[in-house]
Amino acid sequence: MPDGLSHPAMPSPARTLRSPEALAEAGLVPAAALPGLRAVSERYAISVTPAVAALIDRTDPADPIAAQYIPRAAELLVSAQELEDPTADHPHSPVKGVVHRYPDRALLKPLLACPVYCRFCFRREQVGPDGGLLSEAELDAALDYFARTPQLREAILTGGDPLMLSPRRLGTIVARLSAIPHIEIIRIHSRVPVADPARVTPALAEALDTEKALFLCVHANHAREFPPPARSALRLLARGGVALLGQSVLLRGVNDSEAALEDLFRAMLASRIKPYYLHQLDRAPGTARFEVPVAEGRRLLRALRGRLTGLAWPVYALDTPGGGGKAPIGPEFATPEGADWVVERPLDGAPYRHAAAEPSPEHSLRDTPQG
Ligand SMILES: *Cc1c(COP(=O)(O)O)cnc(C)c1O
Ligand code: SF4
């Protein structure tokens, strides 16, 4: 066992850990695991920032922060249900870097690098530190697609992680999208505020300043991902006028309990983040250890309804493979019975029958000629 494992208070590393060897030196994996992890690292990128390493409790073999980022040899075992591109981004790409699947909104992926590489990532076959950065000409072509597609009302920057761009480059993209009259909303999906909050500088906040509505959708899966540096970063962004949303993935060993989800959503709200999506895990290769069955996810959310502020309630969604879109998957509280609806009362679980409406006298008035 490397020395580090017996020293939980070991100072966290000053640099980002990018190899199995660096993880072992930092006491985050045992030396005996290195041969298996070298094979994993040839296929999937590894990155653990100092901010994330500082959150990991090295005395807890089931630490929910470590579970998200520390590779396991089992990642090379692929089950029959797993797909390389579970969200089918590829066939819906009209121009390099753009995924246009829904009528009113499209993704723009300016780069494929992330601050950290999540072991459950749905784009794990695409993301990584090298490659994926659009050239100037490719970025021009991608922005031109937004400009000449008037049904698009929203540009969603994702990747990779758009906040990995320099503030200058990000600012240019935000300004150029903002100059397109039919683009009303700019949305950015990012893990940077929690995974590498030091990147959130005044210059970055300045780059996000726009007349258009700008939503930042922060990916976080555990309450412990919101220590003071992350909260300060989020406060800086909010002060600049950015609206904050949260997205999480339901993950075995990370947030698969009522208490963990409650704490996560409360931590988000305390950082001004409105939980938006709780994603059912996409079946990317080698991610089976993270899957929580849908029935269990619905049960967990049902238990939280009524108990937690309504602000905490996310949409539990499954991205249907093959590019069919994200569907809400419950839990439902209403069941049809004939023309009536039987609604489960969240506070006591008792059924309430919402009878079909009688024809209203107003309707019959409206239907008469003099109405
Ligand atoms: C998830 C996704 C969106 C955004 O969907 P919302 O439900 O609006 O959050 C847009 N385009 C693609 C291709 C997506 O996968
Ligand atoms: S930050 Fe997002 S895109 Fe990057 S590895 Fe994690 S889940 Fe994948």
Image: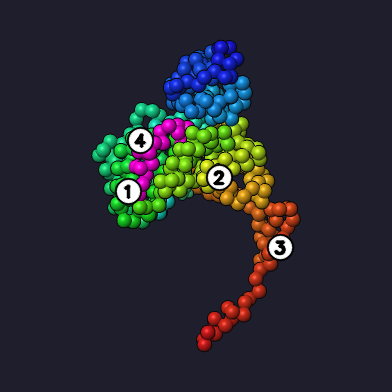
The residue that disc 1 covers is 177
Viewer-side residue, 364 vs 286: 364
SS of the residue under disc 1: helix
Amino acid tagged 1: Leu
The residue that disc 3 covers is 353
Seen in the picture, residue 99 relative to 363 is either above or below; the reply is above
- Number of the label disc, if any, that sits on residue 269: 2
Res. 189 in view? no
Q: Residue 257 occupies which quadrant of the picture? A: top right
How crowded is the residue under tag 1: few (<14 C-alpha within 10 Å), some, or many (20+)? many
Q: How far apart are marks 4 and 1 (CA)?
A: 16 Å
Q: Relative to residue 16, is residue 341 drawn left or right?
A: right
How crowded is the residue under tag 2: few (<14 C-alpha within 10 Å), some, or many (20+)? some
Amino acid tagged 4: Leu
Eye-nearest disc, 2 or 3: 2
How crowded is the residue under tag 3: few (<14 C-alpha within 10 Å), some, or many (20+)? some
- Number of the label disc, if any, that sits on residue 251: none
Q: How far apart are marks 4 and 3 (CA)?
A: 53 Å
Viewer-side residue, 91 vs 328: 328
SS of the residue under disc 2: helix
* Residue 43 percent across, percent down from the top left: 44, 24
SS of the residue under disc 3: strand
Q: Residue 188 occupies which quadrant of the picture? A: top left
**Does the magenta-highlighted stretch encompass residue 207?**
yes
